[in-house]
Image (cartoon, coloured by chain):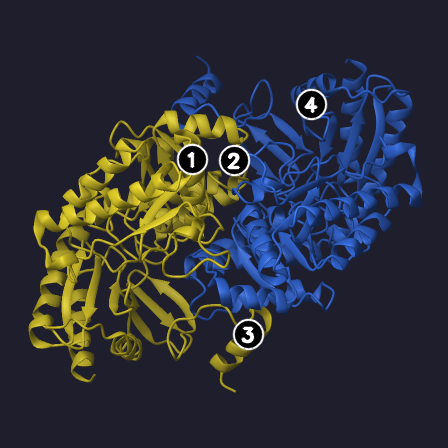
Chain colours: A blue, B yellow
């Protein structure tokens, strides 16, 4: 038994069989630095997948801030401490002034759970709208918004799923403004269907860049129109920015891409560079009423160590101009992918914003028939060639790339070269 | 405006009004070391409240393990890594062999949420039993088990609350075995009531030492009988060990106090000494089926840094014999409290196991009328006298003490002396 087989056997024995693992030949990682990951044999991989360490793996400034605070004090928020206040202040400074309250938790699932609870409390409604290719977390309430995995409890009557705004396999072959309106009409229809069933709308919860759906280049006016329908029905718009925030898209927030200001926004993944911190930001009237009624408290949420790590992430984003880098290198990579699209028929569509990309793989350019098997094969080939990525999407055929934000043009050239080679070998 | 007033104003502006704070005159803490906390004016407080830093505030071995791993690699569990396996192995070695699978998350609420979901999946039931003075977390599902705070959604039909097994204000003035049986009969009645409503039992979820209820010295045979009723009805017993595990009670696990092996156990608070890590441990047939069906994944849960901190906590518990210390010093403190009880009429009852104590404060020894106002006043007096504690319980009149486990007899003498003084000044 080699080392990996031994680890796999222990894993199955201790954690069971239901633990997801990447790649047919799983990776045993031991070190991370910048955009690079290293396995136990000392082999180096260009990380084009991990968005959590968005400032780069084990960034010294973040590690130092974490350690300094861990050496000094780590305690819950029922005592006064500056870190949570400094952090909340810096987040709010980057947002529309209507978003004026911060509530911290530990995971994206917790943030979405609390956002849904406060939407219900604020609106008096119970109904939620999500897309038909969504995933937002793992509590029994949030799992109701999972189209990808049916919740073990089955779907509740208060959920309506709307067609995700696919800009490639478009509804009725529409384009531009007409397409945006057609998708927004689906939201209106979902609200009507809820009303017919006697259910009042609480809100719509979507990722503003449709990250799990497979990304989309649909016009911003889709979300603008959809949110108007939601507001007209007395609901709130919750932007799940767990993947899209903190510079990933080349703007600081994902909702800037969509030209809407959410009523409630949820944050997670890259927030603390791997340290478990998440958050909900909303208007005071929404958060305050909820907190006072629900007596929400989270033992670990917003502790001085979590906030020290999260503050350091903001420092690095600013000091290293990583949002600007995401925009600039993102454009460069996107152009490169479009070049590969001209060369390789299997690439049906290339989408992205900032350093978040989806490459839609098809068997046939004309029919746009999805190629999920080839997509998975390519992901495994890339891993063996030393570049890490994954696949997502409603049809499981979209290459998903979200490299750490210090990704350089040199890294991009390396990625494009290896991807070209592996596409040729398919 | 002094510094505290300034922090309070910023806090209200940034976080809103619904954030719980301890003490009429809140504490601005800046440093922790061992059993001591320090405020911004350099004043020292003996920490008799915080169970999260159970190995002592900022323990150097835990901090070093955390920092070393944070400098090296922090990544999710879809790659292979030793830390999660080493940690799971060490936990399981300390448990009954029937408990053979570990699933990691970040907070106690997440652990209880997942435990409830897997209980439902395993049993096919939906109903849950908790006590009538319980609190187990903040998701919409787990909040259903909160008797202390009514969930904003209202109570669902699948919840039954049973009288908590109070060993002081006893049911029908019963004692010993008869009392244990009388409380267990409440569980049987709850199951019957569920069945009458056409609801199948999924499980009973309680803290094995009734921590939030106000602690209890009821005989172990209560839980043994109650669990038998639950099993007979096809349900599972979930022990919420978020507060009671990791040596707190003078035994490694809280359920050892109750003489029962749970079907599912949840862990949190002291697990990573403040680093957000929590877990569910259960029989493989329960966890595996759930994980395979629900596709459970937690981005931060079980990452190498969390597990490094949690492994280091286990090291310290062993190396410094903290479980034994909790038992020994716990007995010493309990004797001291009983001495104070003889002297101060306001102390109606003293309960505890290991280094977890409840002092039940009454207006009258005969009627046992609760004294919540005096209890709160004492908590605030103790804070000004340099000793930190809080109050809990169904009647809000129980002094709650859970000092870090390296608590010494010298610390105990200091606590007893200050408490004696402040009780005299009430």
As measured in the structure, the alpha-carbon distance from the residue carrying label 1 to the one carrying label 3 is 40 Å
Q: Chain of mark 4?
A: A
Same-chain status of marks 1 and 2:
no
Q: Is B307 situated left or right of B401 in this image?
A: right
Question: Outermost residue, front direction?
Answer: B196
Mark whose residue sits in front, 4 or 3: 3
| Foreground pick, B110 / A400 | B110
Q: Chain of mark 3?
A: B
Q: Residue A153, labelled with which disc? A: 2
Residue B7 higher or lower than A371, as above or below: below
| Foreground pick, B274 / B376 | B376
Q: Are marks 1 and 2 in contact (CB under 8 Å)?
A: yes
In primary-sequence order, the first of circles 2 and 4 is 2
Q: Are marks 4 and 1 in contact (CB under 8 Å)?
A: no
As measured in the structure, the alpha-carbon distance from the residue carrying label 4 to the one carrying label 3 is 48 Å
Q: Determine crowd level at label 1: few under 14, some 14-19, many 20+ residues with C-alpha closer than 10 A.
A: many
Which element carries disc 1, helix, strand or loop?
A: helix
- Expressed as whole percent of the image width and height from the top left, the position of residue A395 reads 73, 26
Reading the image, the residue beneath label 4 is A379
Residue for point 14% across, 58% down: B172
Q: Determine crowd level at label 4: few under 14, some 14-19, many 20+ residues with C-alpha closer than 10 A.
A: many
Reading the image, the residue beneath label 3 is B12
Q: Residue B120, labelled with which disc? A: 1
In primary-sequence order, the first of circles 1 and 3 is 3
As measured in the structure, the alpha-carbon distance from the residue carrying label 2 to the one carrying label 4 is 32 Å
Mark whose residue sits in front, 2 or 4: 2
């Amino acid at each position: 038994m080699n080392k990996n087989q031994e680890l796999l056997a222990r894993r199955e024995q201790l954690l069971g069989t239901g633990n997801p693992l990447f790649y047919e030949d799983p990776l045993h990682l031991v070190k991370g630095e910048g955009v690079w990951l290293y396995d136990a044999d000392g082999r180096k991989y260009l990380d084009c997948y991990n968005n959590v360490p968005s400032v780069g793996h084990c960034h010294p400034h973040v590690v130092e801030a974490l350690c300094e605070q861990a050496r000094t004090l780590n305690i819950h928020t029922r005592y006064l401490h500056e870190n949570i206040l400094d952090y909340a202040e810096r987040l709010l400074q980057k947002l529309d002034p209507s978003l004026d309250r911060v509530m911290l938790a530990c995971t994206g699932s917790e943030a979405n759970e609390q956002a849904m609870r406060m939407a219900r409390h604020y609106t008096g409604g119970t109904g939620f709208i999500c897309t038909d290719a969504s995933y937002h977390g793992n509590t029994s309430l949030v799992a109701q918004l999972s189209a990808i995995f049916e919740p073990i409890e089955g779907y509740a009557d208060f959920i309506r799923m709307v067609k995700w705004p696919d800009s490639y396999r478009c509804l009725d072959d529409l384009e531009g403004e007409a397409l945006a309106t057609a998708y927004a009409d689906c939201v209106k229809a979902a609200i009507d269907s809820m009303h017919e069933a006697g259910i009042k709308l609480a809100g719509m919860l979507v990722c503003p860049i449709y990250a799990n759906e497979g990304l989309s280049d649909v016009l911003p006016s889709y979300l603008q129109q959809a949110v108007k329908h939601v507001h007209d029905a007395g609901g709130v718009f919750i932007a799940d920015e767990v993947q899209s925030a903190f510079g990933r898209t080349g703007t600081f927030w994902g909702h800037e891409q969509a030209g809407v200001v959410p009523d409630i926004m949820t944050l997670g993944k890259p927030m603390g560079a791997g340290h478990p911190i998440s958050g909900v930001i909303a208007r005071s009237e929404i958060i305050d009423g909820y907190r006072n009624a629900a007596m929400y408290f989270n033992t670990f949420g917003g502790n001085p160590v979590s906030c020290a790590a999260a503050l350091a992430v903001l420092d690095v984003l600013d000091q290293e101009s990583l949002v600007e880098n995401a925009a600039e290198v993102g454009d460069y990579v996107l152009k490169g992918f479009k070049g590969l699209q001209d060369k390789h028929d299997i690439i049906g569509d290339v989408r992205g914003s900032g350093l978040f990309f989806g490459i839609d793989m098809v068997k046939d350019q004309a029919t746009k028939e999805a190629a999920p098997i080839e997509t998975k094969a390519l992901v495994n080939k890339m891993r063996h060639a030393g570049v890490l990525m994954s696949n997502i999407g409603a049809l499981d055929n979209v290459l998903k790339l979200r490299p750490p934000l210090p990704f350089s043009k040199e890294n991009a050239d390396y990625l494009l070269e290896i991807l070209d080679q592996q596409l040729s070998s398919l």
